[in-house]
Amino acid sequence: MTDWTSLSYVVVDVEGNGHQPPDLVELAAVRIVAGIVGEPKSWLVKPDQPISHFARRIHGITNEQVADAPVFGYIEADVLKALNASALIAHNAHVDVGVLQRKLGNWECPEVFDTLKLARRLLPGRLTYKLSSLVEEFNLAHGLDGEDQPHRATYDAIVTARLFVHLAGRRALEELRHQPPGGSTDDAPTLF
């Protein structure tokens, strides 16, 4: 059995502009090395299209806040450096991975661990597996006062990193990788 801490991980969260397909407005990356959650890196990004009213209501980022932010091409090298890890982690990962693949073109996504799918499998019987509910249940937001708030990339990346460490616990890497036959395809698309 392989210790899960033998891999280096990067936890990502993206906030989008509310259009389909979603375009990047904010991105955060948090490394987990040797089982320790590191310091986050985050970027505000000027999207190709304005932020929709719906998306603003979710994450609170306004068009004025990103008016002077760099376009993605300007930060792409820094983002690629931040994503350099053995595995990527996100909650409802297909959304984050999809945005990153569209923005990064030839980027080869590493192995992905989706904390939504992991929580469903390792913590059966809950009424909801929303990130906010799991954060509250396991008190994963302690110490995140001030500017960090739910639905902002830095906050969501940090609490997702803490959730992954909580779920991984004393489990072997093989148990984290195990998927039920046929997998799960019932994740609803996300607009932001």
Image (cartoon, rainbow, N blue to C red):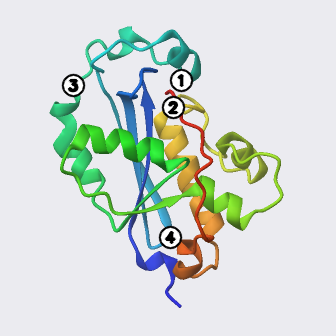
Reading the image, the residue beneath label 3 is: 71
Few, some or many C-alpha atoms within 10 Å of disc 3 (few <14, some 14-19, many ≥20)?
A: some
Closer to the observer: label 3 or label 4?
A: 3
Query: Which is more N-terminal, label 1 or label 4?
Result: 4
Few, some or many C-alpha atoms within 10 Å of disc 2 (few <14, some 14-19, many ≥20)?
A: many
Above or below: residue 82 compared with residue 75: below
**Could you tell whether 52 is left or right of 109 in the image?**
right
Reading the image, the residue beneath label 2 is: 152
Query: Which is more N-terminal, label 4 or label 3?
Result: 4
Local SS, label 1 = helix
Mark linked to residue 59: 1
Local SS, label 2 = loop
Q: Are marks 3 and 4 in contact (CB under 8 Å)?
A: no
Q: Which residue sits at x=33%, y=63%? A: 110
Q: What type is the residue that disc 4 sits on?
A: Gly
Marks 2/3: CA distance?
Answer: 18 Å
Local SS, label 4 = loop
